Amino acid sequence: MRFFLISDNVDTEVGMRLVGIEGVVVHEKDEFLRALEGALEDPNIAIILVTTKLIELAPQVISELKLTQPRQLIVEIPDRHGSTEIGEAIDRYVSEAIGVKL
């Protein structure tokens, strides 16, 4: 089981590659969804890391996958250009998952 990165930033991809995590760099929503679909189909990938900016391109798709995907974990990671607080993203995800505003 391994990690896989889907990033909008080359710096993030290079940093992750230095620690042994393979990944791709995409910028458009359809590129992102194709890369995500490919990662979801790979049985060797256990954790999919996705930068915040890409999550914001398809929040409904990601929320649905996080709640229904039985095999892989999708994790939002900030990059050095991100402006969204990761804590807010986690609060939003938990609120959507349990139906209670935190």
Image (cartoon, helix red, strand yellow):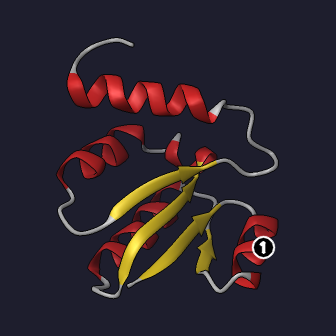
Q: Nearer the viewer, residue 33 or 23?
A: 23
Rendering coords of residue 102 (x, y %): 39, 13
Residue placed under numbered mark 1 in the picture: 15
The number of numbered badges drawn on the structure is: 1
Q: Residue at x 56, y 67 (%)?
A: 6
Q: Nearer the viewer, residue 87 or 30?
A: 87
84 is higher (above) or lower (below) than 52: above
Q: Residue at x 66, y 30 (%)?
A: 85
54 is higher (above) or lower (below) than 93: below
Q: Nearer the viewer, residue 65 or 35?
A: 65
42 is higher (above) or lower (below) than 26: below
Residue 82 lies left or right of residue 24; in this view the side is right
Image quarter in which the N terminus is found:
bottom left
61 is higher (above) or lower (below) than 74: above
Residue 30 lies left or right of residue 11; in this view the side is left
- Amino acid type at mark 1: Gly
Rendering coords of residue 78 (x, y %): 67, 47
Q: Residue at x 38, y 80 (%)?
A: 45
Residue 29 lies left or right of residue 83; in this view the side is left
- Disc 1 secondary structure class: helix
